[in-house]
Amino acid sequence: MPSALSRLLCAGVLVSLGGPGCVRSDDCDYRYRCVGGSQYEWCNVGSDFEIHRTLLECKAPNSACIQEDEDSVQCVLAPATVCDASFVDRCEGTWRVYCNERLGWVQAVDCVTLGRTGCLVDAALGKAVCD
């Protein structure tokens, strides 16, 4: 079992104080990362100074994991598809499929889970809406 000092060093707590640091093969060099088509891993150092990894799942309708940057992931509609402002919203059953322009990826929302009856394309608005 590692000593309290070695756990502090491995957690990076003493590195800022000029400590020598620690290299372990199980260190978290990321916060979130995709580890499979629909799974991602969250890695953090807990209050016990131990490294904790949690495997999480992207849920439908956004069941594909994409690595947004080195420390963050997003769950998007599968198959993962990039989009821009020219993307035309649509309905797929009760799902409203749209472009999340901030992310630049196609996502979906299940209108029924929002308490609506379903999805419809509003001709006046020119886009899909939950009704």
Image (spheres, rainbow, N blue to C red):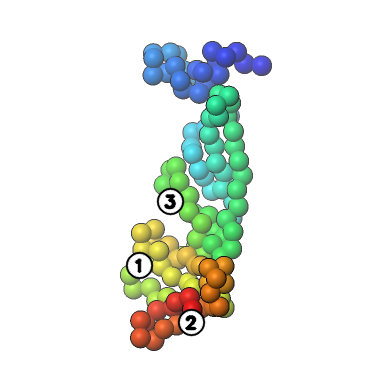
The amino acid sitting under disc 3 is Glu
Percent from the top left, x then y, of residue 13? 45, 20
- Residue at left 40%, top 79%? 127
User: Of label 2 and label 1, which has the lower sequence position?
Assistant: 1
Q: Is residue 98 left or right of residue 118?
A: left
What is the crowding at mark 3: few (fewer than 14 residues within 10 Å), some, or many (at least 20)? some
The amino acid sitting under disc 1 is Asp
| Residue situated furthest left in the rendering | 85
Percent from the top left, x then y, of residue 12? 46, 22
| Mark 1 residue element | loop
| Mark 2 residue element | strand
- Rounded to the nearest angstrom, the CA distance separating label 3 from label 1 is 16 Å
Q: Which residue is mark 3?
A: 68
Q: Which residue is mark 2?
A: 120
Percent from the top left, x then y, of residue 20? 45, 14
Q: Is residue 14 left or right of residue 58?
A: left
Q: Is residue 122 above or below residue 41?
A: below
Query: Visible in this render: residue 23?
Result: no
User: Which circle, 2 or 3, is nearer the viewer?
Assistant: 2
Q: Which residue is mark 1?
A: 84
User: Which circle, 2 or 1, is nearer the viewer?
Assistant: 2
How many labels, in total? 3
| Mark 3 residue element | strand
Q: Are marks 3 and 1 in contact (CB under 8 Å)?
A: no
User: Of label 3 and label 1, which has the lower sequence position?
Assistant: 3
Query: Visible in this render: residue 20?
Result: yes
- Rounded to the nearest angstrom, the CA distance separating label 2 from label 3 is 30 Å
Q: Is residue 25 left or right of residue 66?
A: right
